[in-house]
Image (cartoon, rainbow, N blue to C red):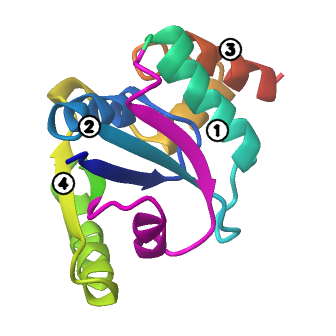
């Protein structure tokens, strides 16, 4: 039986923290659907099409992940409905710090209420990547700082281009 996990997020942009969660998720699941949110409730730096391309370049060009085990999509429906569409009973979520847990716990509970067949799996990124957030990466690059410890080369290139 193929075990598929949905990894939803904004990925604006993808960071090494996100990538750690994907790497660890691949040890548990046969396939991961990286689901890039296309809901208009956030002020994104990149539109969903750009974020999908950034994620694909980071995972497949920079890091050479197996394309057969990861699919990158856009979504604007409930994550539980996305799970149903892709025949997945698992939502993958990353935790950086204790401060993330309360929100993630509530989200997992709501998803469970919407569909009690879905389990949320929490994975922590490695210690050196736990402090990374997309928000900080964007702030650092905007102020001309060095972000090579936080994301991939192709992502850095696209971020620099955005802030030129």
Q: CA distance from mark 3 to mark 1?
A: 15 Å
Q: Which mark is residue 157?
A: 3
Determine the image quadrant of residue 46.
top right
Q: Residues within 10 Å of mark 2 (few under 14, many from 20)?
A: some
Determine the image quadrant of residue 110.
bottom left
Magenta-drawn segment: 65-90
Q: Residues within 10 Å of mark 3 (few under 14, many from 20)?
A: few
Which is more N-terminal, label 1 or label 3? 1
- Whether tag 3 and tag 2 are in contact, CB under 8 A, the answer is no
Which is more N-terminal, label 2 or label 3? 2
Q: Which mark is residue 111?
A: none
Q: Nearer the viewer, mark 3 or mark 2?
A: 2
Which is more N-terminal, label 4 or label 3? 4
Task: Please tell me whether mark 4 sits on a helix, a strand or a loop.
Answer: strand
Residue annotated with mark 4:
122
Q: Nearer the viewer, mark 2 or mark 1?
A: 2
Give the percent coordinates (x, y) of residue 39: 65, 67
Q: CA distance from mark 2 to mark 1?
A: 21 Å
Q: Left or right? Give the position of 157 relative to 72.
A: right
Residue at x 24% of width, y 72% of height: 118
Above or below — where is 38 with respect to 77? above
Above or below — where is 55 with respect to 102? above
Residue annotated with mark 1:
52
Task: Please tell me whether mark 1 sits on a helix, a strand or a loop.
Answer: helix
Q: Nearer the viewer, mark 3 or mark 1?
A: 1
Q: Residue furthest bottom?
A: 113
């Amino acid at each position: 039986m193929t075990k598929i996990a949905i990894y939803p997020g904004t990925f604006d942009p993808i960071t090494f923290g996100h990538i750690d969660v994907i790497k660890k998720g691949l040890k548990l699941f046969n396939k991961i659907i990286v689901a890039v949110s296309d809901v208009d409730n956030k002020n994104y730096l990149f539109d969903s099409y750009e974020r999908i391309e950034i994620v694909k370049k980071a995972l497949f060009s920079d890091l050479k992940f197996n394309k057969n085990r990861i699919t990158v999509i856009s979504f604007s429906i409930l994550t539980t409905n996305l799970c149903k569409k892709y025949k997945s009973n698992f939502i993958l979520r990353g935790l950086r710090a204790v401060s993330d847990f309360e929100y993630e716990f509530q989200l997992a509970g709501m998803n469970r209420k919407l569909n009690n067949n879905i389990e949320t799996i929490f994975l922590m990124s490695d210690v050196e990547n736990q402090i990374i957030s997309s928000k900080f990466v964007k702030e650092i690059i905007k102020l001309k700082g060095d972000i090579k410890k936080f994301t991939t080369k192709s992502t850095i290139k696209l971020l620099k281009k955005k802030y030129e």
